[in-house]
Amino acid sequence: MIHNASAIPAKGENQWQHFSPFKTGISRQKSMSFRFVKKDGSIIMTESEGELFDLFGLKQKDVLQKKIEEIFPPEMAAFKRKVYERALAGESLTYEGELNGIPFLAAIGPVAKGGIITEAYGFCVDLSDRIRIETQLAESEQRFRSLMDHNIDALFSLDMDGKFTTVNQACTELTGYNEKELLNMTFDPLMMPNRKSLAIDNFKEALQGTSQMHEVYIRQKGGGIRQVTFTLTPIIVLNKVLGVFGIAKDVTAKREAERELRETKELLEAVIYHSSDAISVIHLKDFSVKLNPAFEQIYGWSQDDLLNMSSHMLPVVPEDKAAESERLMTIVKHGGYVKGVETIRVTKSGKRINVSLSLSPIYDESGEVVALSAISRDITDKKLKEKALKESEEKYRIIAENTTDLIGVVDFKGNVKYFSPSNRLLLGFDPSLYDGKRIQAFFHPDDRPKVKIAINEMVHTQKPVKFEVRCKHAHGHWVTLEANATPILNDGDQPASFVVVARDLTERKKTEEMLRKSDKLSVLGQLAAGVAHEIRNPLTSIRGFLQLLQTKANENEEYYHIMLSELDRINSIVGEFMLLAKPQAMNFTKTDLRQLLNQVISILDTQAIMTNVQIHFDCESNTPEIWCVDNQIKQVFINMLKNAIEAMPTGGSVHIHLKKQGDHVITSFKDHGCGIPEERIATLGEPFYTTKEKGTGLGLMICYKIVENHYGKILIDSKIDEGSTFSIMLPIEKNKPASE
């Protein structure tokens, strides 16, 4: 068989490029490739290689540079010459054949150089596997057909539209339609009107890939009604649902027997009568009710009290539970069941009680729900006990889980027996991490000897001890805890273990530090208010007389400059005192920090040039304006840039970077000076603490105060001999006036 694989390419092209055997999905089969040319009227094989070459029983010496009449049997050689001639004429072809008992598929096509066809190229694949699979498929189809024809249950398949595609003999017997009739119809005519929507829903769910089992009534061709259980399974081929396979069992006789059993009233009434649970049966057509004695005992209503009901809703349902009751009854009316729902019901006297409620549908012969039964159990005492237990557990749980103190039990070998959940709050670790481990491993190495001494003291005195210890936090830092350890004695009055109650001192120490700094500021403020004006007045007089003497002096001019310079420095210090003592007006305006920084750079540019310092300013394009007191922030920037310049007395570079980060704008000043020791960074910003030879520490303290008043932060990163980076983090919108 010869197939036209593709159209003939235009001249001048590599005509073989239009055919690729790998696109056919057969690349994993045994194959071979070959080339041939036409020479002196003969077709000559110029190349042949591949696994299939060996399977054909061919050898290179018997093929290469040989005519096809010398390679293949006469009949095949004649056929191949015909198709090879067509390939050399510019046509791409595929064909099937058999050589030495091996079926194959071949594809050939022309190869052109410079627009002239010079040779042809071919490719063969082994078709043995395909033929074997086709044989197996035929056998499988026969077995499936046998299973269909001889099964006692009705078997069928449906396409995506619900139309029958296969049916067996049992299916025709169940429905009354012959095979031809069924194969020309959908399942719709078989369904009862009141159950048709359910059948359609189950069919759609099966098409979604979920097997379904349901029971419905079907109408036979002759009008008979049969009760059938259907099992629907999706037909999936290559991960695609193509239809549904179904099994139908006729359960009519079985259901009739069950109905007769349900109608055995004596047995049913005996069960209902002697039950300790309240049982009621409500008919949905006339709203008649049947009650058992337990119902009257629990709720107070008798069957005579409920003779003239106008609704299926019993008076035991309180108004606030009416909607819930309607929802549960709707489930039962559609054939569903409600089991063990805990709810509230009311007695005839008006008392509300907790009940466990179960509802079930009752069907008639046609499968319609005609009544429902309700079984309720009084669980009021049970609920009260559960509530009391829950409240007790909740109380202790709240205490255990929300206390800020860490509670632990440790034996005297140091092994942890218990840690409270508050450990997550204090140290960030799950308490189970400590179980069975030595508690000393979690202490700071410098604190372990101190803790050991305290524990030894507790062992000898059998009295509680108190100590401070640093413990490792999950984030890597150390948390200072104040611990109280109390010994637990065994039956021999010997310490067996001890209970540790630890409290985080971090916030307390921060508060103490803040109070210490506040005291310094308070003293400084009082000092400033008391002496600033008194100092400035004499300074003004002294400076005036010095300037007067300077105009009349003929020598020692440099001494006057030195004295005037020192007086100016004293005046500057007094000015900084006044800034701390006098509250500053906070008039927040929307400010462009880029413009503000450019002004600051212009002010200090001369000082930078004189000390051989270069200032580099980099600003991100999306940096927004912020709300601030511009002259105060300007003072902060001047102090920061001035400090950076003075940190490099021999010259260098200062890098200023402005960027947006979250809800803040960060301005960083980076110098390449000598850096600040890590232990000194924490004290920067305190009055009279400075790293400069002639500094007072007031400038940086004022910066901290201004930034703090703007709800911002100053971050410091410094390394010895590498330089320091001071970053001012200011909020974008937090200082916005309420009127804006």
Image (spheres, rainbow, N blue to C red):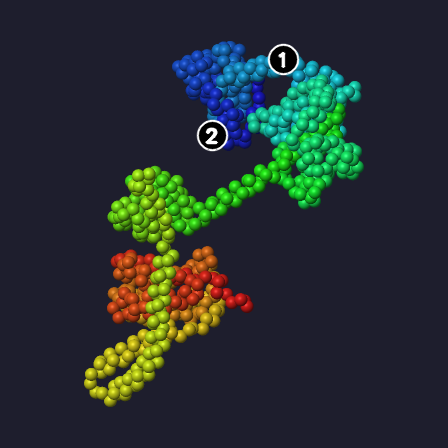
Q: Which residue is mark 2?
A: 113
Residue type at numbered disc 2: Lys
Residue 625 horizontal/vertical position (percent)? 47, 64
Work out whether residue 614 can be spotted. no
Residue 360, compared with residue 74, is above or below; it is: below
Residue 576 horizontal/vertical position (percent)? 35, 73
Residue 8 horizontal/vertical position (percent)? 56, 28
Asked whether disc 1 touches disc 2, contact meaning CB atoms under 8 Å apart, the reply is no
Whichever of callouts 1 and 2 sits on the residue coming sooner in the sequence is 2
Question: Which residue corresponds to the image point at 63% horizontal and 28% vertical from the top-left?
Answer: 206
Between 398 and 717, which is closer to the camera in this rendering? Answer: 398
Give the class, few, some or many, for how many residues have Cα within 10 Å of label 1's Cα (few <14, many ≥20): few
Residue 247, compared with residue 193, is above or below; it is: above
Mark sitting on residue 146: 1
Question: Which residue corresponds to the image point at 29% horizontal and 60% vertical from the top-left?
Answer: 680
Question: Which residue corresponds to the image point at 31% horizontal and 62% vertical from the top-left?
Answer: 683
Residues under labels 1 and 2: Cα distance? Answer: 59 Å
Residue 619 horizontal/vertical position (percent)? 42, 61
Between 83 and 353, which is closer to the camera in this rendering? Answer: 353
Residue type at numbered disc 1: Ser
Work out whether residue 505 can be spotted. yes
Q: In the rendered view of the protein, which quadrant contains the C terminus?
A: bottom right
Give the class, few, some or many, for how many residues have Cα within 10 Å of label 2's Cα (few <14, many ≥20): few
Q: Is residue 192 left or right of residue 736?
A: right
Question: Which residue corresponds to the image point at 52% horizontal and 22% vertical from the top-left?
Answer: 107
Q: Residue furthest front?
A: 492
Between 226 and 631, which is closer to the camera in this rendering? Answer: 226
Q: Residue furthest left?
A: 555
Q: In the rendered view of the protein, which quadrant contains the N terminus?
A: top right
